[in-house]
Image (spheres, rainbow, N blue to C red):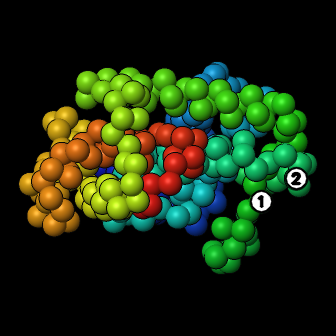
Amino acid sequence: MNSASESINERVVRIRFIKEEKNEFIQDYKPFIAATVEKCVGRYVTYGQDDELSIGLIAFEEAINHYDFNKGNFLSFAQNVIKRRVIDYYRKEKRHQNVAYINDYYPDEGDEDSVYDYIMTAEQIQSKYYDQEINDLRKAEIMQLKEDLQKFDLSFNDIAKSSPKHKSTKKSYLDIVKFVIENKEIVDKIKQKKYIPVADIQMATKLPRKTIERARNYVIAAVLILTGDYYSLRDYIDWGV
């Protein structure tokens, strides 16, 4: 039983191996799962009709099973797991698979480790349907990225012009990106204040100030894509991180 003061994060940790309460928790958050899936696929989906929601349900249970209380908010973590699994579904699931829905399989009481041994479910995706869905996802991500770049007064043309042409320059830019991505405070500063903290980056990377300033547009694009909901675009670019 959850108390009124119990947080979502605490509830997830408590119910992880309690079959009935985990089922109830999943049912309570079906609207959240649907909203996350819809944002990912760019269209309305319905339980019982769309395979993506079956993937979303399974991914939500996966998030419950693997959530680490010390690493942040559960719902943010679950959202990312759902989106990654839906993308994986579109990319990889082209053949019929054995079907086992989330409520069809639970381990024997006391065998907690086997709770992770569930089977993902999906129906066959025809090649044409698969390609169209991937294209739609990519287009949606491109449009969203365009809007995010505009907040920094940047366009795709600006990013193309700033892309490194030489191997040594690319390595320097990727070193900057790697440092930034590994430091949440720097990422937050870039997103909130719309500028690159050159001094902080210079101190950490020992790179020339001019190199960091020239990398500005490239770094901003990398930060947006690597920390945002750009799972399709992300796999087409070698960021070196």
Q: Where residue 139 appears, x then y in whole percent? A: 58, 26
Residue 65 falls in image quadrant: bottom right
Q: Where residue 142 appears, x then y in whole percent? A: 50, 28
Q: Is residue 138 left or right of residue 162?
A: right
Sequence order check, earlier mark of 2 and 1? 2
Q: Where residue 214 appears, x then y in whole percent? A: 23, 44
Q: Nearer the viewer, residue 178 or 227?
A: 178
Q: Where residue 172 appears, x then y in whole percent? A: 30, 60
150 is higher (above) or lower (below) than 127: above
Q: Is residue 99 left or right of residue 180?
A: right
Find numbered disc 1 in the image and state the secondary structure of the residue it sits on.
loop
Q: What residue is shown with label 1?
A: 119
Find numbered disc 2 in the image and state the secondary structure of the residue it sits on.
loop
207 is higher (above) or lower (below) than 23: below
Q: Nearer the viewer, mark 2 or mark 1?
A: 2
Q: From the image, which quarter does the C terminus lie in?
A: bottom left
Amino acid type, callout 2 = Gln
156 is higher (above) or lower (below) than 208: above
- Residue neighbourhood size for the residue with mark 1, other residues' Cα within 10 Å, grouped as few (<14), some (14–19), many (≥20): some
Q: What residue is drawn where x is 41% and y is 28%? A: 156
Amino acid type, callout 1 = Ile
The answer to whether any part of residue 181 appears in the image is no
- Residue neighbourhood size for the residue with mark 2, other residues' Cα within 10 Å, grouped as few (<14), some (14–19), many (≥20): few
Q: Are marks 2 and 1 in contact (CB under 8 Å)?
A: yes
Disc 2/disc 1 C-alpha distance (Å): 9 Å
The answer to whether any part of residue 105 appears in the image is yes
Q: What residue is shown with label 2?
A: 97
What is the total number of numbered labels drawn onto the structure image?
A: 2
Q: What residue is drawn where x is 69% and y is 73%? A: 114
37 is higher (above) or lower (below) than 140: below
